[in-house]
Image (cartoon, rainbow, N blue to C red):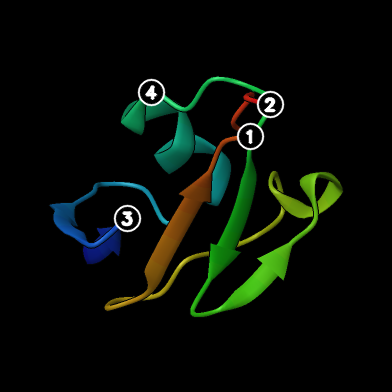
Amino acid sequence: MNITINGKPLNVNSKALVEVLQSFGAVAPFAVAVNGEFIAQSQHSNYVLNEGDSVELLSPIQGG
């Protein structure tokens, strides 16, 4: 299945968001949006991706 993560095309074998995030190497803490909609962390394990979805993985930045 073809999706996009942070603007990069990616072919994944799983439709489960949590599995795709793990295979992408996501390290907590992070926020996730699929097709522009925020997905709460409590929903990551139940969320199913579809062909062509665009996933944005956002990590907090520290600075001053």
Find residue 29 and name its label: 2
Residue at image coords 36%, 48%: 14
Find residue 6 and name its label: 3
Q: Is residue 19 left or right of residue 37?
A: left
Amino acid identity at mark 2: Pro
Distance between mark 1 and mark 3 Cα atoms? 15 Å
> Label 2: few (<14), some or many (≥20) within 10 Å?
few
Foreground tag (1 vs 2)? 1
Quadrant location, the C terminus? top right
Amino acid identity at mark 1: Pro
Local secondary structure at mark 1: loop
Amino acid identity at mark 4: Gly
Distance between mark 2 and mark 3 Cα atoms? 16 Å
Which residue corresponds to mark 1? 60
> Label 1: few (<14), some or many (≥20) within 10 Å?
few
Which residue corresponds to mark 4? 25
Residue 5 in picture, x, y percent from top left: 31, 55
Splitting the image into 4 quarters, where does residue 39 fall?
bottom right
Distance between mark 4 and mark 3 Cα atoms? 13 Å
Q: Is residue 55 left or right of residue 17?
A: left
Question: Closer to the N terminus: mark 1 or mark 3?
Answer: 3
Are discs 1 and 2 less than 8 Å apart at CB?
Answer: yes
The answer, for residue 54, to whether it is visible in the render is yes
Are discs 2 and 3 less than 8 Å apart at CB?
Answer: no
Are discs 4 and 3 less than 8 Å apart at CB?
Answer: no
> Label 3: few (<14), some or many (≥20) within 10 Å?
few
